[in-house]
Amino acid sequence: MTNSVRVLGLIVATSGVITLLIWLLRDDVLLAWAKGNDGAQATLSEGGIEALRESPSAPGFVALAVVAFVGFALLAMVLASFFVGGHPWTRFVLTGTAGVGVLVGAICLDNHLPVIFVVLSGVIIVEGLVLLFFLWQRSTTTYLRDV
């Protein structure tokens, strides 16, 4: 159980690093998004990165990342507290959360993102799988039954 909570904290920390990097490398993220978008490529060729930043079709990656991170961090805190309190249903919710994290990490691997995001996506996938391992260990089941 303790290792599950530690890995969950590590996933939140990694998500925080990813959010910070999205802010620091926002132009690189925007350019990566533009690679697969003909309209964005036209805007980029006509007016450069400034025009692409100001384009109404360009997603607000920083705002999306911050909101997603805050929501995920708060959810993880609440679920961890219920999990430590011995509520068995949290194992299923954390399993789903880890599964979604692995899925999102896999999607990010195939989206022409800067290399650091590809590496961190791989890290998130590994962390999610490790969390799943710890969530379903026999000692975790014993803990949830005995608390």
Image (cartoon, rainbow, N blue to C red):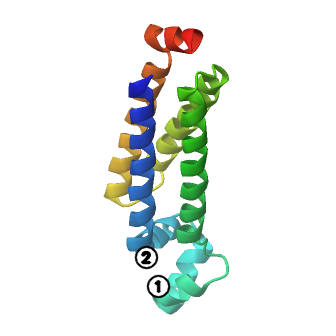
Q: Is 98 placed left or right of 15 in the picture?
A: right
Q: Of the residues shown, which amino acid type is indicated by label 2?
A: Asp
Residue 71's disc number? none
Q: Which disc number belongs to residue 27?
A: 2
Residue 29 in sight here: yes
In the foreground, 37 or 97:
97
Give SS at disc 2: helix
Question: Residue 105 in the image: x percent, y percent?
Answer: 47, 43
99 displayed left or right of 134? right
How far separated are the C-alphas under marks 2 and 1? 8 Å
Q: For the N terminus, give its image quadrant.
A: top left
42 or 75: nearer the eye? 75
Where is mark 1, residue-wise? 49
- Compared with 124, 60 (above or below) is below
Q: Residue at 42%, 41% (x, y): give it.
A: 9
Reply above or below: 63 against 2.
Answer: below
Q: In which quarter of the image is residue 40?
A: bottom right
Identified at 59% across, 72% down, the residue is 60
Which sits earlier in the primary sequence, circle 2 or circle 1?
2
Circles 2 and 1, Cβ within 8 Å, touching? The answer is yes
